[in-house]
Image (cartoon, grey):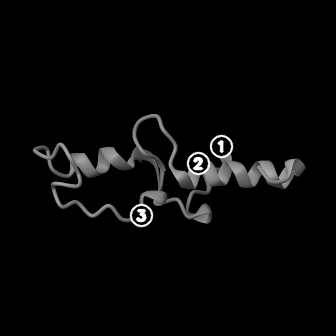
Amino acid sequence: MNEILDNPSQLGVTNVTDGWLNTVFDSDPDCDNAFTCGVNLADPDRYLFWDFLHPTTAFHQLIANDIKSVGFGVI
């Protein structure tokens, strides 16, 4: 985790502090659904978290790669 937080761009992550959904919804206070508000939903994997708690697919992949690198094989 510290490696990700210390070097996020090295891992393809650009935002380790904000949740992707929070960024989408904060861009329009009247928006309660990103799909109906025409928000660009590109690049969620540039974020470490979907919201304040849940990790993105990119974060899960980083964890899986770390586990594989220490010899646990295919997950």
| Mark positioned earlier in the residue sequence (3 or 2) | 2
Circle 3 or circle 2, nearest the eye = 3
Q: Secondary structure at mark 2?
A: helix
Residue 22: give x, y in percent of width and height: 31, 44
Residue 65: give x, y in percent of width and height: 73, 55
- Marks 1 and 3 sit apart, C-alpha to C-alpha, by 21 Å
Q: Which residue is mark 2?
A: 5
Q: Residues within 10 Å of mark 1 (few under 14, many from 20)?
A: few
**Given the image, on which type of amino acid does mark 3 rest?**
Asp
Q: Is residue 71 above or below residue 10?
A: above
Q: Which residue is mark 3?
A: 43
Q: Residues within 10 Å of mark 3 (few under 14, many from 20)?
A: few
Q: Secondary structure at mark 1?
A: loop
Q: Which mark is residue 68?
A: none
Name the residue: 42% across, 45% down: 50
Q: Are marks 1 and 2 in contact (CB under 8 Å)?
A: yes
| Mark positioned earlier in the residue sequence (1 or 3) | 1
Q: Quadrant of residue 38?
A: bottom left
**Given the image, on which type of amino acid does mark 2 rest?**
Leu
- Marks 1 and 2 sit apart, C-alpha to C-alpha, by 6 Å
Q: Residue furthest left?
A: 30
